[in-house]
Amino acid sequence: MAYWLIKSEPEAWSWDQQVKAGDKGTPWNGVRNHTAKLNLMKMKKGDRAFFYHSNVGKEIVGIAEVAKEHYPDPTAEAGDPWVVVDFKAVEPLKVPVTLGAVKGEAKLKEMALLKQSRLSVQPVTVDEWKIVSKLGEGK
């Protein structure tokens, strides 16, 4: 299993909306960055992703799972190379993990969230996943 972080502005698509979408999941559309697209294309069904509220909140609020692997983005112009992956909500974090908390954890200093802060779809290492998950438990 691989781990990821996906970002959404809560006013555009929130964790609560993701939860309401149910087990079918929803397409993560509108990604228009080549590196983020390549990350979507690497995802496999069952991979897990932190759901991060960007812009407002700036915190990891839940865990989502890849429900369907990449396919053409229906919101893209005909012929454009963009893709989507369907995600379904798995569970909220007991305690949201703020950007400040990530910055404050020395073992996360190389995390893409800090190094590539504008990238909307990012890889997360196994060690980073464990540390953030523990922070999300309130420990």
Image (cartoon, rainbow, N blue to C red):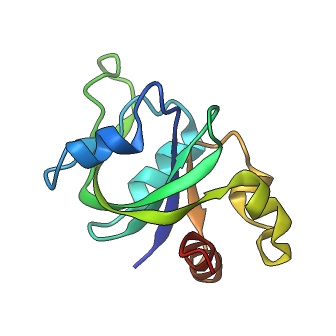
Residue 106 versus residue 116 in the image, above or below:
below
Residue 52 visible (yes or no): yes
Residue plotted at (42% across, 61% down): 42
Q: Check the picture and name the quadrant holding the C terminus.
A: bottom right
Residue 105 picture location, percent across and down: 81, 72
- The single residue placed furthest to the top in the displayed view is 77
- Give how far across and how far down residue 11 sits, in percent: 47, 25
Q: Position of residue 32 (x, y in %)?
A: 51, 30
Which picture quadrant has residue 100? bottom right
Residue at horizontal 73%, vertical 45%? 117
Left or right of 1, for residue 102: right
So how many labels did they put on this image?
0
Residue 129: x and y, percent? Answer: 57, 75
Q: Nearer the viewer, residue 3 or 71?
A: 3
- Specify the farthest residue to the left: 24
Up-down relation of residue 8 to residue 90 (above or below): above
Q: Is residue 26 left or right of residue 38?
A: left
Between residues 106 and 4, which one lies in front from this camera angle? 106
Q: Nearer the viewer, residue 96 or 84?
A: 96
Q: Is residue 132 above or below residue 43?
A: below
Residue at the image point whose x is 28% and y is 71% from the top: 46
Determine which quarter of the picture holds residue 65. bottom left
Task: State whether residue 84 appears in this view.
Answer: no
Viewport quadrant of the N terminus: bottom left
